[in-house]
Image (spheres, rainbow, N blue to C red):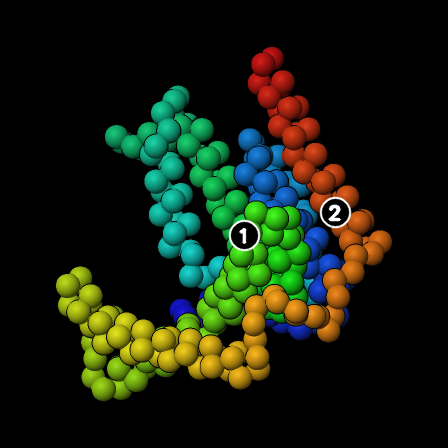
Amino acid sequence: MLKDITIGQYFPGQSIVHRLDPRYKIIITLTYIIMLFAAAKIPSLIPGVIFAVTALILSRIPFSLIGKSLKPIIPLIIFTTILNLFLYDGDPVIKIGFIEIAYDAIETSIMTIIRVIFLIAGTSLLTYTTSPIMLTDAIESLLAPLKKINFPVHDLAMMMTIALRFIPTIIEETDKIMNAQKARGANIETGSLAQRAKAMVTILIPLFVSAVKRAGELALAMECRCYRGDVGRTRMKQLKSGAKDYIAIILTMAFLALVFVLNFAFRNLELF
């Protein structure tokens, strides 16, 4: 299960999505999130779904990889769906004994499933197609106006990127520690809740020690390379936007506008 988590990983490529300015990719990702959650009805989610599928095809990221990254959240999706089915009151569409399910509950459950799946699939493209260094530069560039109030923009961008970068490393380390403890006879997957919690201590302590050690090694490596934050720092690759970036942001805004148009259209239909 741990090997299925691909958050924070970067997959090099030369697709049009890879070559977009990372600053625009961050803005597009934020707009895409608004696109999904601004939808008030199921038809209003269609532009977001089309947008995500098109972006995945253009990025040349295998759909199997996206499916793999969705495996860990399947229990959450199932739990949320079942919960939504019983949270909404109204005229029951389905009635089995004492169980009554309203139309609004079914609609909300379907929308939740679509939102969660495409939220993970769409936003994952940001890290899949952007290197950690470029992502750091993009975040720092977008937050640059905050420097006027002495906000540590560079430090924040660096911390966020390092955190994303080390997610796959920590997951891999956790998997190794779990396999090592199982080989020593540790019973992690069976037993009562208290027994499992106690068994997890044998994983968390080595993982914590390993994470601290890695952080120390990283700090030492940065210090050896004379890292001093953004003071006097230059960049080998400068961020440059072009026609493809402008077209991408315009298309994204057009899809967002279409969501609001569909919301308005279906709201008027309900009035009649």
Question: Which residue in the rendered view is the most extreme toward the bottom?
Answer: 184
Q: Is residue 234 left or right of residue 160?
A: right
Tell me which amino acid carries mark 2: Ile
Q: Quadrant of residue 89?
A: top left
Which of 64/235 is in front?
235
Tell me which amino acid carries mark 1: Phe
Disc 1 is placed on an element classified as: loop
Give the labeled residue for mark 2: 249
Could you tell me residue 222's position as x and y percent?
Answer: 53, 78
The residue carrying pointer 1 sits among few (fewer than 14), some (14 to 19) or many (20 or more) residues within 10 Å by Cα, namely few
| Residue at the spot 33% in from the left edge and 34% down from the top edge | 86
| Residue at the spot 75% in from the left edge and 66% down from the top edge | 238
Marks 2, 1: nearer the viewer: 1
Q: Is residue 219 left or right of residue 98?
A: right
Could you tell me residue 146's position as x and y percent?
Answer: 59, 48
| Residue at the spot 63% in from the left edge and 18% down from the top edge | 268
